[in-house]
Image (cartoon, rainbow, N blue to C red):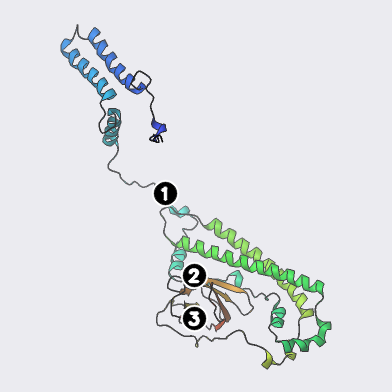
Amino acid sequence: MEPHPIPQNVTTFQFHLVGDMTLKQFLYLAAGSTIAYLLFIWGVPYYPLIAWPVLITSALLGIAFAFMPIASRPLDYWLKAFLKAVYSPTKRVWVKNRKTFRDDPLFASRLVTYLSGLQPMQTQMPTDYPLRPPLAWLREASRLPTTAKSDLTTASSDLPTPAELGKTVDLARQAQNLQVRIIQTERALNQIKAEASQPAAIPIDYSGQVNKIIADLQILVSQASNIRQQLDEVTKRDQINLAAVPPTKLKEKIRVVMSAKPKQIQATLTSFPNIINGVVKDKTGNYLEGTVTVIYDKEGLPVRALKTNKLGQFTGSTPLPNSTYTLELEKDNFSFDVLQIELNGQVLPPLLITSK
């Protein structure tokens, strides 16, 4: 078996064009010899004391540049490195560019931007608009036990028609898509606020992005209002009267937890009122990272989406209005109870939530 040839760097490969010399070596040798020859013809007869040293030096330099590498590198490489090291600046002085930041659109609101990084500001988000949850009457009907559903068969004439039911399902899908888009837009707005509160070497103008996001939110709110009106028109005609069902037969699937009942921990995560915060653990007491906590208002509309850190902690960035809220936690291979909490303008202690 023949030995494999040694790989070579073909990008810097130089062909031997003149005998065993490369073209570069030949040019260096020719340049030194030419200068020495011209000095011998024109300089030696008239100025021998000056011509002979220059002649010898020129010939030796041509030979050295062509055939005398140092550390496997030719002399021209070392000459370039020497000149670059000598003439490159070694001392740099910072000079003002005379740029004024008063022309920056965010300069006037710099105090608000700074304070927003220190304490959360209460803002009225589009998600706070009361929207009726889609298909609320269908959800309640699906929670009825078998005995309750059998009692409702007598009122079959009050059930919606297939066309009306299809229209309601279509509206519910549109409402669900709007809810997802509102949450994503809110996350983008919070991210821009966090980036704007951090100091940067080069000022960045976030006014255009903020105006675009606010315009998108207004469009989403108007669309949600239209869908709400359409859902109200459909559900007013076809809502099932659940009052006839005995309340003792309904199966409770949501555990209601008041603000004073959840387990509390000593560490405080926030010092501002109406900010929901807490710690999530598993059965063995280990912190759960990446648990998604979705907060719904009393109308069933999601108003916040939080995520736990490495210590299992989650906390909101802005306070919520006084009302009753529902917490739903999601994480792969874990299940949690649905919690309900009431906000009344007080500082909430951290909630200690454990998976089932």
Q: Residue furthest front?
A: 1
Q: Secondary structure at mark 3?
A: strand
Visible residue check, residue 52: yes
**Looking at the picture, does residue 124 appear above or below residue 258?**
above
Identity, as a three-letter code, of the amino acid under mark 1: Lys
The disc at residue 290 is 2
Q: Nearest to the eye among marks 1 and 3: give it.
A: 3
Residue beneath the point at 60% across and 78% down: 297
Identity, as a three-letter code, of the amino acid under mark 2: Gly
Residue beneath the point at 62% across and 61% down: 215
CA distance for labels 3 and 2:
14 Å
- Taking the image as shown, residue 75 lies to the left or right of residue 165, namely left
**In the rendered view of the protein, which quadrant contains the N terminus?**
top left
Identity, as a three-letter code, of the amino acid under mark 3: Ile
Mark nearer the N terminus (3 vs 2): 2
Name the residue tied to disc 1: 99
Of the pair 253 and 128, the residue shown nearer to us: 253
- Taking the image as shown, residue 18 lies to the left or right of residue 191, namely left
Name the residue tied to disc 3: 353
Mark nearer the N terminus (2 vs 1): 1
Q: Secondary structure at mark 1?
A: loop
Of the pair 2 and 240, the residue shown nearer to us: 2
